[in-house]
Image (cartoon, rainbow, N blue to C red):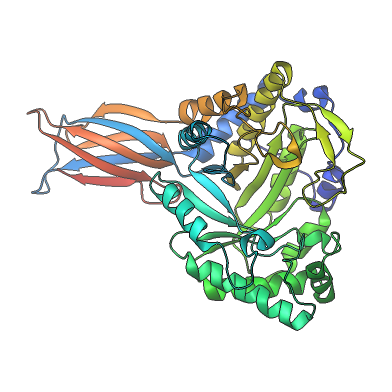
């Protein structure tokens, strides 16, 4: 797809102020254009699939002709995920079982909680054991893990000292401890969360962060994270997509190279879904940094906003908001909007991951009907829509036979596959094949 050619400075002007609700016609206008939909599908074909040659040879190195090859996709290289904060935390074993099954059947990526006040309620006693259990659960199901967040000023641990130098030492020790403890198990980290708005929660952490300034605050923690995990994938994450965030990221350079690996962008759309023009502009703008983009926190609701609760004090999780229960009408709208939003992101070459926030309406952020599952863990239309895309339309299955040179050509979505190869004499071999986005496309299978 040829995206809108908007200069960077103008781009930010055009997509700033995104919190206002979008009228349905604003969201749907470009989507209803067949030419636009066609370009999106061509971009998915171009950026998410690749050509490869499977070459089947015998142990003597000679090609095996007329071998039947069946290729079945097992997982995407693209990361489709969700936070996994309530694993085994629901009211009954049956609800937990349904939650786990639905999560496993759709996602290959999970965000695990590392919020400092809850993760270390007693100084020096972080909740590593529970995290270890979640990591093991994910590993058994082939789900990649990410930790979120290591550094955020939203709330102080109740035991946090007043002295800034002691806070600095403890914060950096925590980053080092978490990354080293889970190396090889959790190798993706939201290192710093929301640096554009330091101090807005009135915390001691926020005061300390403000005393440093956003760029030094983020830079120092990235340096600590890199020293602790030289091979880890480090993210900076924010809900703002205006110049303030871009400028912070652009200044985080060492030796001319950015100090982090992935741009994290939140897209909580409780009060209005981004129109397609904004999706393109945000992706195009941040792609100029030359790094992959992860949409780290994505929300589209299926319940109505009822207003603010005057009895509740605003906080980082906006619990003062009141939301209605999910309804069939709003569930249908949510499914349509979720499908289109994911399709637009999947078509953009800079986007490498999308994480939903939260999976079920039970314990969802802002107490909104934000899930793809209802409170009883039954799937909403949004779940079925994404399963149709992720495990249907964007899922490869290929059958063919090798030619006289023992070769077979295929075009598949990037990811991992199982191949069953059967010779004319009935001998059979099963192999695991990988189709990464940037790799050699000639796959030799020795029978």
Give the answer, above or below, for where 299 lies relative to 8.
above
Quadrant location of residue 26? top right
Percent of width and height locating residue 46: 52, 37
How many numbered marks, from 0 up?
Answer: 0
Give the answer, above or below, for where 231 lies relative to 39.
below
- The reply, left or right, for residue 72 in relation to residue 86 is left
Report the residue that reaches farthest toward the right.
Answer: 310
Report the residue that reaches farthest toward the top.
Answer: 329
What residue lies at 61% left-to-right and 41% top-to-bottom? 348
Percent of width and height locating residue 212: 80, 76
Percent of width and height locating residue 7: 80, 49
What residue lies at 49% left-to-right and 26% top-to-bottom? 393
Image quarter where the C terminus lies is top left
Give the answer, above or below, for where 82 lies relative to 302.
below
Visible residue check, residue 87: yes
Image quarter where the N terminus lies is top right
Visible residue check, residue 255: no
Quadrant location of residue 372? top right
Percent of width and height locating residue 263: 65, 55
- The reply, left or right, for residue 111 in relation to residue 49 is right
- Work out whether residue 148 or residue 375 is closer to the camera in this orientation and state it: 375
- Work out whether residue 430 or residue 423 is closer to the camera in this orientation and state it: 430
What residue lies at 60% left-to-right and 70% top-to-bottom? 175
What residue lies at 81% left-to-right and 45% top-to-bottom? 318
- Work out whether residue 44 or residue 25 is closer to the camera in this orientation and state it: 25
């Amino acid at each position: 797809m040829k995206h809108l050619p908007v200069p960077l400075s103008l781009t930010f002007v055009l997509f700033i102020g995104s919190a206002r609700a979008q009228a349905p016609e604003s969201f749907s206008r470009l989507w209803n254009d067949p030419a636009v939909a066609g370009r999106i599908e061509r971009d998915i074909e171009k950026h998410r699939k690749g050509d490869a040659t499977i070459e089947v040879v015998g142990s003597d190195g000679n090609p095996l002709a007329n071998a039947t090859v069946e290729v079945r996709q097992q997982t995407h290289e693209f990361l489709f995920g969700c936070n996994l904060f309530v694993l085994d935390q629901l009211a009954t074993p049956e609800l937990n079982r349904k939650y786990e099954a639905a999560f496993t059947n759709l996602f290959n990526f999970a965000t695990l909680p590392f919020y400092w006040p809850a993760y270390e309620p007693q100084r020096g006693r972080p909740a590593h054991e529970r995290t270890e259990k979640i990591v093991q659960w994910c590993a058994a199901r082939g789900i990649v893990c990410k930790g979120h967040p290591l550094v955020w000023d939203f709330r102080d641990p109740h035991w946090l000292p007043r002295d800034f130098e002691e806070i600095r030492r403890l914060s950096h020790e925590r980053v080092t401890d978490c990354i080293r403890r889970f190396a090889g198990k959790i190798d993706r980290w939201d290192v710093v969360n929301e640096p554009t708005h330091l101090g807005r929660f009135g915390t001691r952490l926020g005061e300390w962060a403000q005393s440093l300034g956003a760029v030094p605050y983020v830079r120092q923690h990235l340096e600590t994270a890199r020293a602790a995990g030289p091979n880890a994938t480090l993210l900076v994450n924010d809900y703002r997509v205006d110049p303030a965030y871009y400028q912070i990221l652009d200044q985080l350079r060492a030796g001319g190279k950015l100090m982090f690996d992935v741009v994290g962008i939140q897209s909580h759309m409780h009060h209005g879904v981004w129109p397609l023009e904004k999706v393109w502009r945000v992706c195009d703008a941040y792609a100029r940094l030359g790094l992959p983009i992860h949409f780290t926190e994505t929300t589209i609701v299926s319940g109505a906003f009822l207003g603010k609760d005057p009895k509740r004090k605003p906080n980082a999780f906006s619990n003062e908001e009141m939301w209605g229960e999910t309804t069939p009408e709003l569930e249908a709208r949510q499914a349509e909007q979720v499908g289109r939003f994911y399709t637009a992101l999947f078509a953009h070459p800079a986007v490498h991951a999308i994480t939903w926030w939260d999976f079920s309406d039970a314990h969802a952020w802002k107490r909104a009907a934000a899930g793809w599952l209802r409170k009883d863990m039954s799937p909403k239309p949004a779940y079925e829509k994404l399963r149709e895309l992720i495990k249907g339309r964007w899922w490869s299955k290929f059958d063919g036979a090798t030619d006289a040179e023992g070769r077979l050509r295929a075009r598949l979505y990037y990811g991992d596959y199982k191949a069953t190869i059967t010779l004319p004499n009935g001998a059979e071999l099963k192999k695991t094949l990988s189709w990464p986005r940037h790799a050699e496309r000639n796959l030799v299978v020795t029978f």
